[in-house]
Image: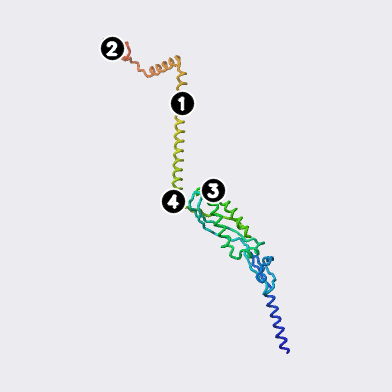
Amino acid sequence: MKYTKSIISGLIVIVIVVLIFLSGTTVASGNRGVLLQLGAVKPTILTEGFHFKFPFIQTVQQIEVRVQKEESTQSAASRDLQTVTTKVAVNYSVDPGAVNKLYQEIGLDYRSRIVEPAIAESLKAITAQYTAEELISKRPEVSAKVKDMLASKLTKYYMMLEDINIKEFAFSEEFNKAIESKQTAEQNALRAQRDLERIKIEAEQKIAQAGAEAEALRLKKQEVTADLIQLKQIEVQEKALEKWDGHLPSVTGGATPFIDVNGLKKE
């Protein structure tokens, strides 16, 4: 009888320990706990740490609320009917205060059921509003519109969009060649325009230089007077006398010939 009581007491202790063990649960860091009672979602949301629950009646489903990353590659048609393949990275998180509703209405596969389709739909809708060239030149604007539309879609399903980054726009080979040809033509046109401007400036400089030279010549002509001409003639004669060796030429090119006086004396 004594041993029977001891065994019963031991079993009771074991049962109590097991119940205590089953009554406790721990929610990991970066998660929230959805409390389920006999399969039904309760409004209580368990935060990080240790919590008590009714064993065999209540269970806890943990859902991550940290920022998650989703990368997607989607093909869509632009406004000018060019095929555009867009690679995008999306950062989002589950609303910590609505994990119970997310689990109840969507479940744990919210990424494939909500996030991926929302990204694809947003990219296709915004891409169709722009031409292929505008997608490149207005990339920040396109990214902002995709972000607004995607944020609106995720908010309906208890998720928050943190950020979006369009990594790449890829086009068909034919379109890439057309863009390259256009850029080459634009560069050639710009080069020709610069050459034309250079030639125009050089011509204007030559005209200005010729005008300056003509003006200088006109001023010099205004300075030439009869007195100045006489003075120049005197200067020339003085320089000639400085170089004269004292012998007169026999004949000059003038109307009256010079006669060699020394020769006449000898005769």
In the rendered structure, which amino acid carries the disc numbered 2?
Gly
* Residue under the image location 57 percent in, 55 percent down: 164
In the rendered structure, which amino acid carries the disc numbered 4?
Glu
| Pick the front one: 46 or 102 | 102
Secondary structure category for the residue under label 3: loop
Residue 68 position, x and y percent, is 59, 61
* Residue under the image location 44 percent in, 51 percent down: 174
**The disc label shown at residue 174, or none:** 4
Compute the Cα span from label 2 to label 1: 59 Å
Q: Which residue is mark 2?
A: 263
- Nearer the N terminus, badge 2 or badge 3? 3
Quarter of the image that includes the N terminus = bottom right
Secondary structure category for the residue under label 1: helix
The 10 Å Cα crowd at callout 2, few under 14, some 14 to 19, many 20 or more, is few
Q: Which residue is mark 3?
A: 138
Compute the Cα span from label 2 to label 4: 105 Å
- Nearer the N terminus, badge 4 or badge 1? 4
Disc nearest the viewer among 2 and 3: 3
Disc nearest the viewer among 2 and 4: 4
Q: Which residue is mark 1?
A: 211
In the rendered structure, which amino acid carries the disc numbered 1?
Gly
In this rendering, would 211 be left or right of 120?
A: left
Q: Are marks 3 and 1 in contact (CB under 8 Å)?
A: no
Residue 64 position, x and y percent, is 62, 64
Quarter of the image that includes the C terminus = top left
In the rendered structure, which amino acid carries the disc numbered 3?
Lys
